[in-house]
Image (cartoon, helix red, strand yellow):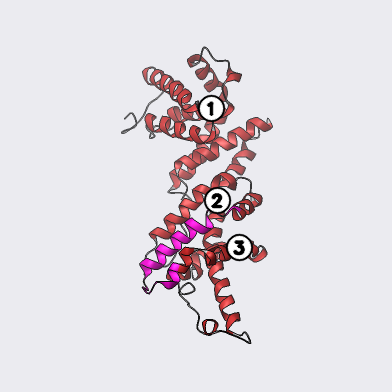
């Protein structure tokens, strides 16, 4: 499922897109923001389905080999460990996965089966695959460990697959690392006797509402927050502050004021970490300094009012 940090990243990207395009249609941009988050679920399911499609290709090649005129002993009696893998079989037989694919018309691997072949060929050449086939042990634990390593070592790092995903939807460029982690967590949590079920996109309704609320409250109060920032950065002209830094600080101020259940220190730490990935080398120090000053003043003049453990 999507976490609060990735929600913040998505909101940051939408605010930045609005500014760069000089677009003030907040309703339209909010719809696109929600759409881009929903499309993350497509990417998540496609990665799971890819595992099953690779297994299906292996079974097909095995069946063809048996029918060769000069079939070898290995062709006639192949090692079926991979096509018998219990975790991949659970994904292939999952009604949850199948229903999502049908409802959202995901025909990616049907229309672009070359990527299934690329992944299968990479798998066949790997020591991971050879070691797995040579292992005498037959257990769910071994099958799961193999599938997780298969995804982490073969699927996730594949550059051609990444380029394909990026070409399908531009927002997936930043989503790929997060979704890869999500897939590994789903595989790790799967139990032997359980039916494989795709995870939820959001943890709960609060997280889903957080998307729209943070976006709208940041955009609608931008001018007010710019004034707050200017007062705490007297030696900086507004146009000297990096665009991403300014957006992250505005979003943090919005959280200070509008989300009483989120601790102030949590907000500051989250935006510092995001800046390390999306802004300049020194941005985290600058953002930390500004937000520390803003938060202290807001607490003193009661603009920040937290509930429960919010002030801790």
| Residue at the spot 51% in from the left edge and 12% down from the top edge | 234
Compared to 253, does 180 lie above or below?
below
> What is the CA distance from the residue labelled 2 to the residue labelled 3?
23 Å
Compared to 231, does 25 lie above or below?
below
Q: Secondary structure at mark 2?
A: helix
| Residue at the spot 51% in from the left edge and 63% down from the top edge | 126
Q: To which residue does mark 1 refer? A: 245
Residue 300 percent coordinates (x, y): 37, 17
Q: To which residue does mark 3 refer? A: 118
Q: In the image, 72: left or right of 197?
A: right
Which stretch did the figure color magenta? 131-159
Q: Main secondary structure of the magenta part?
A: helix
**Mark 3 crowd level (few <14, some 14–19, many ≥20, 10 Å Cα):** some
> What is the CA distance from the residue labelled 3 to the residue labelled 1?
40 Å
**Residue 302, visible in the rendered structure:** no
Compared to 56, does 154 lie above or below?
above
Is residue 181 in the magenta section?
no
**Mark 1 crowd level (few <14, some 14–19, many ≥20, 10 Å Cα):** many
Q: Nearer the viewer, mark 2 or mark 3?
A: 3
Q: Quadrant of the C terminus?
A: top left
Q: Which mark is residue 179?
A: none
Residue 4 percent coordinates (x, y): 45, 41
Q: Earlier in the sequence, mark 3 or mark 1?
A: 3
Q: Secondary structure at mark 3?
A: helix
Q: To which residue does mark 2 refer? A: 40
Q: Earlier in the sequence, mark 2 or mark 3?
A: 2
């Amino acid at each position: 499922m999507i976490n609060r940090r990735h929600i913040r990243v998505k909101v940051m990207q939408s605010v930045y897109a609005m500014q760069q395009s000089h677009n003030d249609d907040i309703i339209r941009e909010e719809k696109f923001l929600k759409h881009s988050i929903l499309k993350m679920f497509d990417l998540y399911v496609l990665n799971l389905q890819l595992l099953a499609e690779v297994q299906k290709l292996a079974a097909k090649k095995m069946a063809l080999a048996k029918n060769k005129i000069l079939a070898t002993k290995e062709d006639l009696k192949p090692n079926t460990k991979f096509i018998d893998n219990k975790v991949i079989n659970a994904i292939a037989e999952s009604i949850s996965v199948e229903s999502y694919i049908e409802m959202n018309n995901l025909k990616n691997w049907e229309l672009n089966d070359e990527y299934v072949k690329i992944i299968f060929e990479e798998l066949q050449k790997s020591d991971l695959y050879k070691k797995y086939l040579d292992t005498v042990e037959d257990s769910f634990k071994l099958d799961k460990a193999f599938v997780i390593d298969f995804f982490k070592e073969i699927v996730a790092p594949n550059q051609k697959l990444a380029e394909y995903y990026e070409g399908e939807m531009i927002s997936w460029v930043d989503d790929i690392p997060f979704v890869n982690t999500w897939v590994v967590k789903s595989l790790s949590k799967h139990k032997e006797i359980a039916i494989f079920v795709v995870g939820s996109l959001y943890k709960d309704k609060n997280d889903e509402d957080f998307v729209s609320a943070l976006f709208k409250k940041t955009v609608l109060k931008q001018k007010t927050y710019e004034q707050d920032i200017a007062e705490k950065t007297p030696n900086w002209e507004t146009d000297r502050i990096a665009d991403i830094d300014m957006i992250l600080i505005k979003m943090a101020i919005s959280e200070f004021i509008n989300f009483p259940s989120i601790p102030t220190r949590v907000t500051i730490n989250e935006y510092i970490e995001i800046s390390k990935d999306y802004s300049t080398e020194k941005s985290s120090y600058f953002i930390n300094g500004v937000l520390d000053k803003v938060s202290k003043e807001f607490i003193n003049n009661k603009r920040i009012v937290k509930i429960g453990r919010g002030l801790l």
